[in-house]
Amino acid sequence: MMNVKDIIVVKQEVNLQVSDKIEFKAVLTEVDEKLFWIGLPRINGQVLMLQENQKVKVSVPLQYAFYSAETILVETGKDYSKFYGLAIPEHFDQKRRNYVRAKYATNVKFTSGAMAVQTSLVDFSAGGLMVYMVPMLAKMLQSGDDTYASFKINNVSFNVKVRFAWLKYYDNIPYGGFEFLYLLPGVRKELETMAHAYSRISV
């Protein structure tokens, strides 16, 4: 288990959740003895409004695990970059990732029926990938037809059936997560090996 001081650090990205439906992303701008500070989080023009002593779930996605805890808003600041001061949790619950994720820049072509949409890869693992959610891709997913993702990593081509898993906004930019379906063991192992290799490069 990581020490709390190694999780709550300046420039660390965190997710804040006050309901089951909305999750805001923020970056730690300052950390003192008892509080960590963030700017005013926004999603698609909507801001996260908190009241003092309000409970907030904070989660920190790191390379090999997710860390989550409950905190409360202690203080509201006046600077945009130092707007909310939240209590540093005494401990975090840890959930290890099933697969290592790695950042990699390449194009991903999604096909569904007669439709095809291209977007950019953000990161990948042996379990799935994250891409920029362009409007045409969101429209294509509404059809309900089987969806396939084609992409290249280190000059190796992949064409995989995928399932749309989630949509999140980071700094008002939409990202989509997709889960790989029915991967052959050898293909999954190859993706896992690549993810481990590129995760070391992107750290």
Image (cartoon, grey):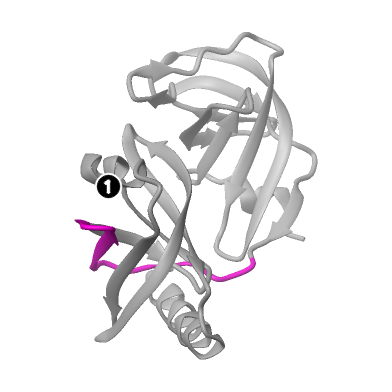
Q: Is residue 166 left or right of residue 118?
A: right
Of the 4 image quadrants, the one containing the N terminus is: bottom right
- Identified at 23% across, 39% down, the residue is 135
Which sits in the foreground, 198 or 194?
A: 194
Q: How many marks?
A: 1
Residue at far bottom of view = 186
- Identified at 49% across, 29% down, the residue is 38
Name above or below for residue 101 compared with residue 82.
below
Give the structural element (helix, strand or loop) at label 1.
helix
Q: Is residue 154 visible?
A: no
Which residues lie in the magenta part?
98-115
Q: Amino acid at mark 1?
A: Leu
Residue wearing tag 1? 137
Which sits in the foreground, 62 or 123?
A: 123
Q: Is residue 196 visible?
A: yes
Which sits in the foreground, 78 or 101?
A: 101
Q: Is residue 109 magenta?
A: yes
Percent of width and height locating residue 2: 72, 59
Percent of width and height locating residue 182: 53, 74
Percent of width and height locating residue 154: 28, 84
Q: Is residue 103 left or right of residue 192?
A: left
Q: Is residue 203 magenta?
A: no
- Identified at 33% across, 66% down, the residue is 149
Q: Residue 143 sits in which quadrant?
A: top left
Percent of width and height locating residue 157: 28, 83
- Crowding at dot 1, Cα within 10 Å, few <14 / some 14-19 / many 20+, comes out as many
- Identified at 79% across, 44% down, the residue is 91
